Amino acid sequence: MASATEAAWRGARPDVGAALRSVHDTRTLDIRRGALADVGQVLREAFDDRAGFVVADERTFAAAGADVVERLRAVGRSAGEPLVFPGTPAPYPDAAHLERVEQAFASVDAVPVVVGAGTLNDLTKLAAHRLGRPYLCVATAASMDGYTSFGAIVTQDGFKRTIGCPAPRAVIADLDVLAAAPTELNAAGYGDLLGKVTAGADWLLADALGLEPIDPGAWALVQPPLRSWLERPDTLREGDPDALERLFEGLTLVGIAMQLASSSRPASGAEHRFSHLWEMEALDAGHAAFAHGFKVGVGAIATAALYERLLTRDLRSLDVDAAVRAWPARDALEASVRAMHANPVVADNAVSETMAKYVEADALRTRLVRLRDVWGDLREALAAQLLPAASLRRMLAAAGAPTHPSHIGVDAARFRAAHAAARTIRARYTVLDLLFETGLHAEVVDEVLAPDGYWGAGDA
Ligand SMILES: [Zn+2]
């Protein structure tokens, strides 16, 4: 499918082909208007001409799934009856759905072909991996970066986690199908992409502290072009095809960066901790979930607001002794983490994630001394990486995405609590950890939530 790949990326950044050659999972990206017509050819060239078995939900089946099945039947490459989940409520990435998808795949000797975005792709990715089969993804909206990413996000007993598993071998994205998707789905994709601003800052932080070195290849795919992908949210909202293609290019390259790093680090920092926390809380409360990218967008504003306050400080004069004296012992920390989560399964998982990144007082001292030493350069790098919270808000609003916790069903009390609880649900180091370890967390959160702080002022 090289020719279609090249055609698809003509005029786009020249390093996409090279990026694709540098990863193992995804070999074919067929992204252009009318790409659905290639489905038989993709199966032939990327999957040894095996038959395909389609999984979709009612919405994605109507958007592209029926077309895919028809085209596969026309070339004698359709296996069994497609598995089509109800459109409402949308399928959830839990054990029951996963079981169903895996059983359906196991019942036919065929290539799993998922037609859909987020959850459907995650379910298929993990089920296909468990069966040891490569799969084909047919995108239906530019709604998130998971199409080409390493790993699937699933929920186990109410706790969301990312499970490492290969990306699809091939992705077909017909730009006509993406353009026909509900505009809010593409706005959600914009929110997910905008989250790479703060995710990049968190990676700079973890790198500078010697905790998680930056992978230069993965970084280069995402961060240098990020601002150009994000620069015209208004045109995306108007349905401009170029804007949609740019957005999809960005989301795709972020996914490839995750494949390169075998980690979601290139794509996910504190903004995703906020998002995943709110997702789990909504699940507990039985609320319909808002789009992933909408929560990431608000989480990115929250994270940027925290960074803004942090960067006003000169940590070269950080009182390391005071921070070490105030550092909680394991038992005290575990109790406080447990108290933050009403769902006992989430609490257990949060404790194990938090304890996985816990360091003893001596190690904390070493880390904070290092922070003091690197802060001059680090502060400059962070300032160059970040955008003001107010800019992120304007960009999201222009794209048609939510910009305030109340827009995604999070009230003021839960929003305040999220600043502490979000830190606990994953071992990955972010600005939330830096604030906690330096003893600045409470005062910085107070500052952003104060009447004259970012969230207190005006419409924020
Ligand atoms: Zn995301």
Image (spheres, grey):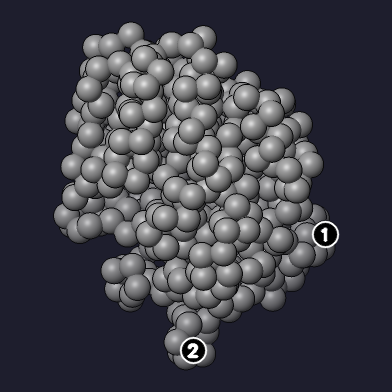
Tell me the kind of residue under disc 1: Asp
Residue drawn at the location 63% of the way across and 63% of the way down: 230
Distance from mark 2 CB to nearest ligand 1 atom below 8 Å: no
Whole-percent x, y for residue 191 in the image: 50, 60
Per the image, the residue denoted by label 2 is 457
Q: Nearer the viewer, mark 1 or mark 2?
A: 2
- For label 2, the crowd category at 10 Å Cα-Cα, with few meaning under 14, some 14 to 19 and many 20 or more, is few
Distance from mark 1 CB to nearest ligand 1 atom below 8 Å: no
| Left or right of 127 on screen, residue 42 | right
Quarter occupied by residue 289: bottom left
- Residue 377, which numbered label? 1
The quadrant of the image that shows the N terminus is: top right
Residue drawn at the location 57% of the way across and 73% of the way down: 234
Tell me the kind of residue under disc 2: Ala
Residue drawn at the location 63% of the way across and 58% of the way down: 242
Depth check: 272 or 50 in front?
50
Q: Is residue 134 visible?
A: yes
